Image: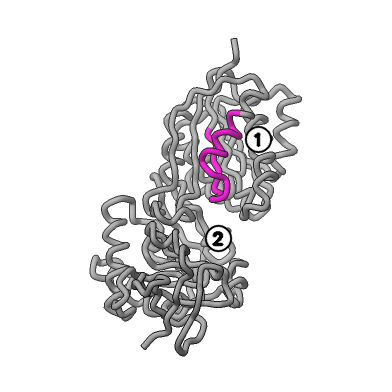
Amino acid sequence: MSAAVTLKKGEGRTVKKGGMWIYDNEIASVTGDFENGDIVTVYDFDGYPMGRGFLNQNSKITVRLMTRNASQEIDREFIHMRVKNAWEYRKKTTDTGSCRLIFGEADFLPGMVIDKFSDVLVVESLALGIDRLKGMILEELKAVLAADGISIRGIYERSDARVREQEGMQRYKGFIGAEFDTSVRIEENGIQYIVDVCSGQKTGFFLDQKYNRKAVQKLCKDARVLDCFTHTGSFALNAAAAGAKSVLGVDASDTGIAQAQQNARLNGFEDRVQFVCRDVFELLPEFERQGEKFDVVILDPPAFTKSRNSVKNAVKGYREINLRAMKLVKDGGFLATCSCSHFMTPELFAKTIQQAAGNVHKRLRQVQFRTQAPDHPVLWAAQESYYLKFYIFQVCEEK
């Protein structure tokens, strides 16, 4: 028999709405023999069964549910069902050449992220309980893919995020199985990239912006484009592919800029795309003083806040770069802007952009509002799965 977790009276509101997390302050008792990482059965205060998941008393998220069925065994058959469902969903909703195959709680495998870059898998394991199941998950995922004729030549682990330490786990990265060349060539929206799964940010490439990158293409034909926080050049290359006259990509990372230049050469865009290693917050005011203007400005910054405590400072950062960018857009030109922070809510992000527009006397006409690609599904009961907000605006002078 597994250990039992009993909730306090009136607690478990998130789980009762369909979420998967139970926090330490919601728990009345844990009974039975267990080790951190073990599967436990969760009961409401009155004994009503809530489901099964893994427990870790080192973490404020003490229980992460795997199933709402309190009698369900978390075995190989169950894991196979979960990964097969995740794959079948991707086949219907996205380009599977390179995509996120497992997106944690939104695929009912909490704490686990697996990205597919062509024939390579990159895995990120962020919770102790799911880490114990990692080998089985990967075996079953490879079997599901093989049934569709997809052979995986290598797996690399990028479990090097700090959040592992909050689970009482060490950060780790390295090969799972045989070593292979970690510079992986992929194609997205008809554009080729070299993805560094060993040293790139997160798992090596930001797949969540796939269709947002495509959405800016129509705006960029014959345009002068500025791509801020370009990372490895993905928005810049989509602009070039769409027929932009010139594209300037900016990023503070030497490594990112080197990869962006490599990707531009790979696609034959080096004649129209340039990259510069600069701090965006310093460069945009310089461009303003020089009287520079662009037809399209793209802002794809890193998350300015990863906690509720730093949201106020994040608002200042988002407001600053957006108002600076609006000043650089020609009258009638376009601004694409986004936030990838879960803690920057859609309402707060919209309010911040509106404040920026008011501060510089610009009128915004919304072209599109978008979110993350469908291989990063938003589970409505799990707010943490909704994080990317992406707007395209036409920027007009007040006249």
Q: Examine the structure image and report whether residue 218 is included in the region drawn in magenta.
A: no
Q: Quadrant of the C terminus?
A: top right
- Name the residue: 46% across, 67% down: 9
Give the Cα distance between marks 2 and 1: 25 Å
Magenta region: 336-354
Q: Is residue 145 visible?
A: no
Q: Sort mark 2 into few (<14), some (14-19) or many (20+) by Cα contacts within 10 Å.
A: some
Residue 62, horizontal then vertical, whole percent:
52, 72
Mark 1 Cα within 10 Å, few/some/many (few <14, many 20+)? Answer: many
- Residue 1 at x, y percent in the picture: 36, 88
Query: Is 110 rendered above or below residue 274?
Result: below
Q: Is residue 86 left or right of residue 160?
A: left
Q: Relative to 313, does residue 19 appear above or below in the rendering?
A: below
Residue position marked by numbered label 2 in the rendering: 202
Quarter of the image where one finds residue 45: bottom left
Give the residue displayed 42% in from the left and 36% down from the top. 215
Residues 345 and 178: in front is 345
Q: Is residue 98 left or right of residue 61?
A: left
Q: Identify residue for label 1.
A: 319
Hey, what amino acid is under mark 1? Arg
Q: Give the secondary structure at mark 2.
A: loop
Q: Is residue 344 magenta?
A: yes
At 27% across and 78% down in the image, what residue appears?
77
**Percent x, y of residue 217:** 44, 34
Q: Locate residue 258, reporting x and y percent.
A: 62, 52
